[in-house]
Image (cartoon, rainbow, N blue to C red):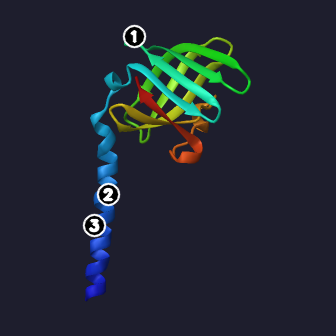
């Protein structure tokens, strides 16, 4: 009898954690994305500025190679997908970049490494495939 109760308790705990995870990001929308976000990935600084008209600039400064790459484009967000997705389109000589992201809180989000095709983005956001951005 106690094994059945333990199983039900564990199952209910998993269900509650799952729903808390899903509902955590439902409080954020596009207005939370506007502004400047800064983070690091390996030996590079990543700075992304998103305007209210959806234009955005992504700067990547590689400290080892001492180069800076700037991408200007149009940002689109999909908050209906889990995890949420970000695309930067109309980038000269590149086309588009895609990533998935997840808010930790209002000022911190985790973004997967960018891909050049939407179907290649990571849907699992873990330390090995993502980087942290902080709102400035």
Q: Position of residue 96 (x, y in %)?
A: 60, 21
Judge left or right: residue 117 versus residue 54: right
Q: Secondary structure at mark 1?
A: loop
Which numbered dot is residue 12? 3
Q: Is residue 27 left or right of residue 73?
A: left
Q: Is residue 51 left or right of residue 130?
A: left
Q: Residue at horizontal 58%, vertical 35%? A: 113
Circle nearer the N terminus (1, 3): 3
Q: Residue furthest right?
A: 65
- Depth check, front residue: 6 or 45: 45
Label 2, residues with CA under 10 Å away: few <14, some 14-19, many ≥20: few
126 up-or-down from 60: above or below: below
Compute the Cα span from label 2 to label 3: 9 Å
> Dot 1, how many residues are within 10 Å of its Cα: few (below 14), some (14-19), or many (20+)?
few
Q: In terms of sequence position, does the residue under pointer 1 or pointer 2 come before the other?
A: 2
Indicate which disc, 2 or 3, sits on the residue closer to the N terminus. 3
What's the residue at 31%, 43% (across, down)?
24
Q: Position of residue 35 (x, y in %)?
A: 39, 18
Identify the image quadrant of residue 23.
Answer: top left
Q: Quadrant of the N terminus?
A: bottom left
Q: Position of residue 25 (x, y in %)?
A: 33, 39
């Amino acid at each position: 009898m106690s094994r059945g109760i333990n199983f039900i308790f564990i199952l209910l705990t998993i269900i509650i954690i799952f729903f808390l995870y899903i509902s955590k990001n439902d409080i954020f929308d596009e207005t939370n994305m506007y502004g400047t976000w800064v983070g690091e990935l390996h030996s590079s600084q990543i700075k992304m500025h998103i305007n209210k008209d959806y234009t955005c600039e992504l700067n990547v400064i590689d400290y080892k190679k001492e180069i800076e790459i700037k991408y200007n484009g149009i940002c689109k967000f999909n908050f209906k997908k889990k995890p949420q997705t970000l695309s930067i389109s109309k980038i000269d000589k590149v086309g588009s970049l895609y990533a998935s992201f997840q808010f930790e809180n209002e000022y911190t989000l985790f973004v997967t490494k960018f891909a050049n095709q939407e179907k290649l983005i990571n849907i699992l956001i873990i330390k090995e495939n993502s980087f942290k951005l902080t709102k400035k």
